Image (cartoon, rainbow, N blue to C red):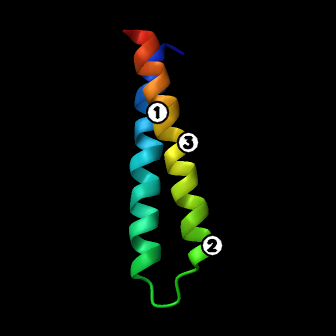
Amino acid sequence: MTIEARIRELGNRHRSLDETIRREVTHPASDSLRVRELKQQKLRIKEQITSLEARAG
């Protein structure tokens, strides 16, 4: 897989997590632990994207 393809894949996962977080926080019985874990996953993906973009130049 090329770096560009990996960045696109991670970007899609990042957006998907963003949607999941939005749905979770608007849910009346949202689980704050789950939201925190989702946000941490999203941050890790963003860091991976940033690292790959730096390598791709």
Q: Residue furthest bottom?
A: 28
Q: Which residue is mark 3?
A: 44
The kind of residue on which mark 1 rests is: Glu
Q: CA distance from mark 3 to mark 1?
A: 14 Å
| Image: 6 above or below 14 | above
Q: Which mark is residue 9?
A: 1
Asked if residue 53 lies left or right of residue 38, the reply is: left
Q: CA distance from mark 3 to mark 2?
A: 17 Å
Of the two numbered discs 1 and 2 in the rendering, the one whose residue sits closer to the viewer: 2
Give the residue displayed 47% in from the left and 16% down from the top. 3
Give the residue displayed 36% in from the left and 9% down from the top. 57
Q: Which residue is mark 2?
A: 33
Q: Residues within 10 Å of mark 2 (few under 14, many from 20)?
A: few
Give the mark nearest the N terminus, 3 or 1: 1
Q: Quadrant of residue 36?
A: bottom right
| Image: 26 above or below 48 | below
On the image, the x and y values in percent for residue 19 come to 39, 61
The kind of residue on which mark 3 rests is: Arg
On the image, the x and y values in percent for residue 9 come to 46, 33
Q: CA distance from mark 1 to mark 2?
A: 26 Å
Of the two numbered discs 3 and 1 in the rendering, the one whose residue sits closer to the viewer: 3
Q: Quadrant of the N terminus?
A: top right
Q: Quadrant of residue 32?
A: bottom right
User: Which structural element holds mark 2?
Assistant: helix
Give the residue displayed 58% in from the left and 79% down from the top. 31
User: Which structural element holds mark 3?
Assistant: helix
